[in-house]
Image (cartoon, rainbow, N blue to C red):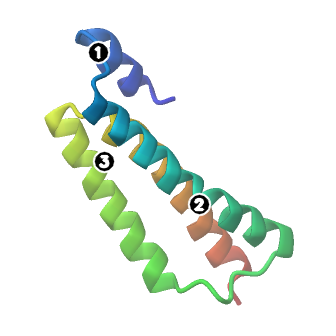
Amino acid sequence: MPVFVLYLMKSKEFKLDWQELLGFVGGALTTAAFVPQAWRLFKLRSAREISLAFTALLLLGIACWLSYGIFLGLTPLIVWNSITLAFTLVMLYAKLKYGK
C-alpha cells in the first residue's frame, strides 16, 4: 500500500460507515476486474487486442480519480485507484512490449 495512503489512514480518525464500506467494496470489485486481464496479457504474451488509446485514456482517467481522492481525502478512492493505476501501468507495459 502506498505510504501516503497509510499516512492518511493514520492522520484522521478512521471510521467505516456504510457509505465508506460501499466505496471500498465497489473499488475492490472494479480493481479486481483488472487482474484477469493483466494475467492474460502476460500469460499469452499478446496485447494486440488491447487498444493503446484505451489504455492511455484509462490511465489518465484513473490518475484524475486518484488526484480527486487525494484532494478530498477519500480513502476508498485513494486506495483502490492507486492499485488500479498500478494495474493499468502493467497493462500499458504489456501493450508496449507485446502489442505488435
Which residue was labeled with disc 2?
A: 34
Q: In which quarter of the image is residue 7?
A: top left
The residue lying toward the viewer, choosing from 92 and 44, is 44
Alpha-carbon neighbours of circle 1 within 10 Å: few (<14), some, or many (≥20)? few
Q: In which quarter of the image is residue 22?
A: top left
Spatial CA distance of label 2 from label 3 is 16 Å
Spatial CA distance of label 1 from label 3 is 21 Å
Task: State whether residue 40 is above or below residue 77.
Answer: below
Residue at horizontal 52%, vertical 61%? 88
Task: State whether residue 15 is above or below residue 66.
Answer: above
Q: Upstream in the sequence, badge 1 or badge 3?
A: 1
Which residue was labeled with disc 3?
A: 66
**Residue at the farthest front position:** 18
**For residue 55, side relative to residue 61 (left or right):** right
At which x and y percent is residue 46?
77, 81
The residue lying toward the viewer, choosing from 21 and 82, is 21
Residue at horizontal 75%, vertical 62%? 39
Q: Upstream in the sequence, badge 2 or badge 1?
A: 1
Task: State whether residue 77 is above or below residue 62.
Answer: above
Residue at horizontal 46%, vertical 53%? 85
Q: Is mark 3 on a helix, strand or loop?
A: helix
**For residue 99, side relative to residue 55 (left or right):** right
Spatial CA distance of label 2 from label 1 is 28 Å
At which x and y percent is residue 19?
26, 35
Which residue was labeled with disc 1?
A: 15
Q: Quadrant of residue 57?
A: bottom left
At which x and y percent is residue 32?
58, 52
